[in-house]
Image (tube, rainbow, N blue to C red):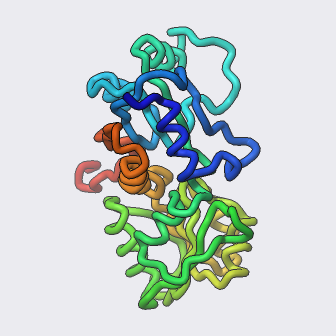
Amino acid sequence: MPKAADIIRAAETIAPPELSAEWDNSGLIVGRAGADAGRVLVALDATREVCREAAAVGAGLIVTHHPPIFKPIQRVADCDALGDKLLFLIENGIAVYAMHTNLDAADGGTNDTLARLLGLTAIDSLGDPPAMGRVGNIPEPLPLRGFAGAASRALGTDALRFTGDPRRIVKRAAVVTGSGSDRKLFRRALSQGADVFITGDVRYHEAQDAIDMGLCLIDATHYATENIVIPPLAARLRELVPDAEFIESAADGQVFMISDPQLLV
């Protein structure tokens, strides 16, 4: 039976650890490398629901994008939600391995997946490789409103936010999955000819900055821009470790819901 270490070796050929940002916490976060991992759950986050799902399907390992431990912790106890979750994983013999910023930067990772899903062509790194974003051409230039609608359909979202003139024709797009609301990234996108920048977690003042710069923004949410990597990641892991069963999580981790205005009356 494959061990967690076998899955980790395969994962590191997909997203080498050296691509991780210095501040990141990718790698084996919980559990033993020698633990049995004949069944693996692949998910964006090790949420409480995902951990329970792993236990229910008998997974010995969860491969996630976001690390469940990011900042230093002082205790692992059931006095808080994180401690309770970690205890659940340990007590059920479930390990967690995170592929975070290294998967963002890797070929075929989160940013490449988003760029391809949006149909971009001539895709290049947003800045010097291994950068955390991509930039590419929109095959058929169209109004911003139309491109935003196409992005919403491609990502399976009910709605998304965007800034800029809805009638403006956009020809080139930059993408940064997850949280890319950053002035430096905006300037980099503009320097590479982007008309529109797709990311998540866009903040008010950064949106104002982008408007002043003449850059359109699409906020498609952190979750929707990254969860799309789970199917291709699981497929690549299946190819590399055919003896293990890789299950794509069925848990919905989207934390922002779109309210129907009719329901608010």
Q: 90 or 246, which is in the foreground?
A: 246
Quarter holding the N terminus?
A: top left
The reply to whether residue 48 is in sight is no
Depicted 15 relative to depicted 23: above or below: below
Q: Quadrant of residue 254?
A: top left
Q: Quadrant of residue 242?
A: top left
Residue at the location (68% across, 79% down)?
190
Residue at the location (50% across, 9% down)?
78
Depicted 109 relative to depicted 135: above or below: above
Depicted 39 relative to depicted 250: above or below: above
Report x, y in % for residue 66. 54, 40
The reply to whether residue 61 is in sight is yes
Q: Relative to residue 59, is residue 233 drawn left or right?
A: right
Depicted 17 relative to depicted 70: above or below: below
Residue at the location (60% across, 29% down)?
69
Q: 206 or 127, which is in the foreground?
A: 127
Report x, y in % for residue 50. 37, 31
Q: Relative to residue 241, is residue 77 drawn left or right?
A: right
Q: Relative to residue 57, is residue 196 drawn left or right?
A: right
Residue at the location (56% across, 36% down)?
67
Q: Quadrant of residue 105?
A: bottom right
Report x, y in % for residue 38. 35, 30
Q: How many marks?
A: 0
Report x, y in % for residue 30. 55, 24
